[in-house]
Amino acid sequence: MSGEVTRRIRKKHGLKNFEPRWSGQPQGAANGKEEDALSCDLSTVQPSEDEEVERGALKRLSTMWSSFRGKFNRDRVMKEPCFQESMEPTPVDTTAREQRYMSGQYFFEYLVVVSLKKSKEGAYEPQITYQFPKRDGMVRFQREEEEKTLKAITLFCFPEGINWAPLTEYHSETFSFVLTEIDGSRRNGYCRRLLPHGNGARPPEAFCIISRLACFGLFSKIFDEVEKRHQISMAMIYPFMQSLREAAFPAPGNTVKIKSFIPDKGTEIISLTRPLDSWLEHVDFRTLFRCLTDEEVVLVFAAAVMERRIVFIAVELSTLSQVIHAVAALLYPFTWQHTFISIVPEILIDVVMAPTPYLLGVQKRLMEQVTDQTDLLVVDLSEDKKDTFLVQSGDEKSILPPKLQDEILQALRNRKEKATVEELNRVVSEAFLPFFVKTVGHFASYVTRNSSGQPGEFQSRAFYKAIESKTTRHFVKKFLQTQMFDLFIQEVEQQQPASTQQGIFHKKILEYQEKTKKEKAKKRH
């Protein structure tokens, strides 16, 4: 499990002769295969009981090279057996309520408090000191999996490792990460770090909520309520979280109201509203456009579209997590398919040496371990930066068709200086989504289907040949080779035609096609 990493494994057999450590590059990469470098086989090592828990956590962090997601190229699936640990289901008496938690119909799975405890060696190590709710009645397999997950969470709440000292002042910060299971399912980690109450110097602690739901703004508000109750007593957190856990997650645009009692204040009603645009609800673009100019954002977007290796550098964890999620959101309706870690724990810093595409967030104190790499884009988000791009290939400005690039920049200029999150999200989506509408929005016309209900077949050559603009056609030919487009078109092929005619992307395609028809009709007259 990692902060997020999504795994596409394409191989004919398992890894061999791979050292059980966190350094080194994926073996087999030179042969054009993306091997699962971090899910290495440790079966030949006989660890102690304590080491087993640690190693289990590290194996959970091995979302590093992504998860099995059923998203392989179909002919590979037919021909190549996948290497995977045995994950046979354990018979469990699952209640209807637990099924609803797993399906994401509730706000969260659990809340944990991660504190820094001094070890015998004198270093501070993150440990879970509070968990709500406690998981009871789990079989051994479930209990072991939970221990591995919780251990991994501590690393992402405190990615700095043991480099801590007691503090008298600490500005609280909120950030997020994503945990990807081996079956491809995702859980979001929302974390708020703050200085606990007390006198004198003390290390910070972290509140972390694990949820199937992606909605950063909503969980930030929940943390405000948790922090308010924590100032009174830890015991005050329980009834609030219990009420929240029992409440169903609202539909986009709807509000849920939670009743909660606070001594001396009585019963409060807390309103939590889910954003109307659900595909942007986990994103806040303000930090991205505060750290980068419009031109720099477009350059980063271009590198991401071509699935390049991209590293973001910043001091604050919140900056890293907000920017990297915002960049991934610019790719909508496509989804980043490679390594994705919003905040790289120090123990995993060697991931920057991977030859495969990634989006990584790295703290500035580790910058020297990143900038000695080549063939990647390193983006400095710091306020005191001299240069934004510390390392770059040099061709990023020529990736996108010039006319469409200018249209994105022109659309971005329409935003207000002090726009709300919702206003900025709307402007940004209206700037970037038309790019994909104009370049690949005609995809549905080039998926041939027969009458027997079999999957369709995408006619790639005819698809890009239909594009009139030479520069756009050149871009699309390259974009067709990305995994994000490959997966997108595979899903289109599998769906019935009516299923593809839904969502905001399809709506924008129809609007563009109608506009184009009218313009052509005017020219004829």
Image (cartoon, rainbow, N blue to C red):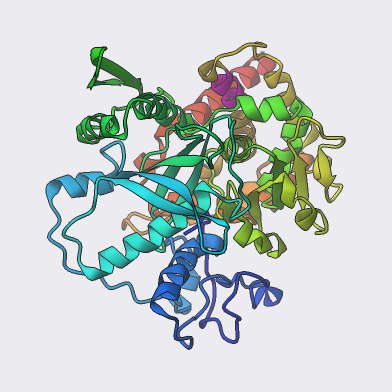
In this orientation, which residue lies closer to the viewer: 486 or 148?
148
Q: Could you say where residue 85 lies in the image, as x and y percent from the top left?
A: 40, 76
Q: Does the magenta stretch include residue 495?
A: no
Q: Is residue 341 left or right of residue 363?
A: left
Residue under the image location 60 percent in, 39 percent down: 317
- Between residues 374 and 175, which one lies in front from this camera angle? 175
Foreground residue among 82 and 435: 82
Question: Which quarter of the rendered picture does the C terminus lie within?
Answer: top right
Q: What residue appears at the point 80 percent right and 57 percent down from the top-left corner? A: 375
Residue 509 vertical position relative to residue 62 in the rendered view, above or below: above
The x and y percentages for residue 454 are 35, 59
Left or right placement of residue 406 versus residue 28 in this view: right
Q: Where is residue 361 in the image (x, y as percent from the top left)?
A: 64, 47
How many numbered circles are shown? 0
Whether residue 3 appears in this view of the structure is: no
Residue farthest front in this picture: 200
Q: Where is residue 10 in the image (x, y as percent from the top left)?
A: 54, 71
In the image, taking residue 236 as reference, residue 10 lies left or right, namely right
Label the magenta part by its dominant secondary structure: helix
Please tell me which residue is depicted at 61% across the width and 48% down the height of the picture.
164
- Whether residue 269 is visible, yes or no, is yes
Q: Residue at x 41, y 25 (%)?
A: 224
Asked if the magenta segment contains residue 429, the reply would be yes
Read off the magenta span.
Answer: 424-431
82 to 113, vertically: above or below: below
